[in-house]
Amino acid sequence: MKKMRITREDYIKANRKASREAEINDHTHPISFKRVHKSKKVYDRKRSKAENKKALPYLFLVRASLYKG
């Protein structure tokens, strides 16, 4: 009868899988640790356009109220 041995690779693989499942249970979704944090100071056209879209309705309300009176 052949004995089954647990190799180092098997041990590492099992630990990683268990760790990942525990992380998903704790946070309810997978967490990425390798993603680089994006600084808010760096120019980002996509972000600045999104911020402008949020502010547009307020600007139109202010201008409309000025022209009515």
Image (cartoon, helix red, strand yellow):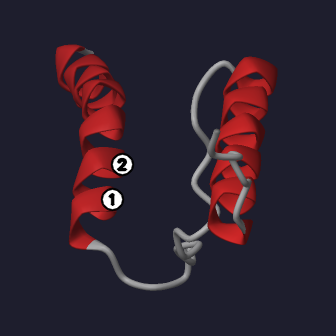
Q: Determine whether, in the image, residue 34 is placed left or right of residue 65.
A: right
Q: What percent of the width, then of the height, locates residue 20?
A: 67, 40
- Relative depth, front residue between 63 and 14: 14
- Relative depth, front residue between 55 and 36: 36
Report the residue marked by disc 1: 47
Q: CA distance from mark 2 to mark 1?
A: 6 Å
Task: Determine the residue positioned at 63% across, 54% down.
Answer: 13
Q: Are discs 2 and 1 less than 8 Å apart at CB?
A: yes
Q: Quadrant of residue 22?
A: top right
Q: Quadrant of residue 14?
A: top right
Please, is residue 37 above or below residue 59 in the view?
A: below
Report the residue marked by disc 2: 51
Kind of residue at disc 1: Arg
- Relative depth, front residue between 60 and 65: 60
Task: Determine the residue positioned at 35% across, 38% down.
Answer: 55
Task: Determine the residue positioned at 75% across, 56% down.
Answer: 11
Q: What percent of the width, then of the height, locates residue 40?
A: 55, 72
